[in-house]
Image (tube, helix red, strand yellow):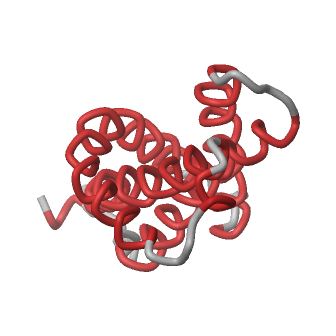
Amino acid sequence: MKRYVIFAAIGPFVGGFLLLLATTYQSGYWSETNGGEVAKLFAVFGKSLPYSYMIGIVPALMFGAIDDILMHIRRISPVLRMLIMGAVGFIAAALAYASHGSESGAKQFILYGLVGLIPGVISSWLSHLYAEGPQHAVTSAQH
């Protein structure tokens, strides 16, 4: 259960912020700023955060389920699981966002792919640290 809470809490927060950064970068916002625009960026992030959770919580929970399934495969180490989750997040976000703008290409594909890669890796890493406890064998005497 902790794994799903970690994915639901971290994924939309980090993904929403990275999506805002990617969108502002694509629009040319950072090339025209004079230095005082960072405060505006965080104000917009604060206003858009509820929408990030509203839209991103179901995909984050699905990624948590994938991570949970991968955790039960003994051959997959935690580092490999984090890389797999990053790859799945990269592909999902890149396909969801990269082809919807006025420009499309490798730059947009990579930029929007990072929106899924980074939260996937961070959430998988945190769930490895905090959600995976020692595995106890259930015996008939414990029932």
In the rendered view, does 79 fall on the left or right side of 135?
A: right
**Occupied quadrant, residue 31:** bottom right
Q: Which residue is drawn at 69% across and 66% down?
A: 77
In the rendered view, does 55 fall on the left or right side of 35?
A: left
Observer-nearest residue: 132 or 117?
117
Observer-nearest residue: 31 or 13?
31
Where does the N terminus fall, quadrant-wise?
bottom left
Residue 82 at x, y percent in the picture: 64, 61
Q: Which residue is drawn at 67% across and 26% down?
A: 95
Residue 6 at x, y percent in the picture: 33, 62
Q: Residue at x 73, y 62 (%)?
A: 80
**Occupied quadrant, residue 113:** top right
Observer-nearest residue: 97 or 125?
97
Where does the C terminus fall, quadrant-wise?
bottom left
Residue 100 at x, y percent in the picture: 63, 20
Q: Which residue is drawn at 36% across and 77% down?
A: 130
In the rendered view, does 39 fall on the left or right side of 19?
A: left
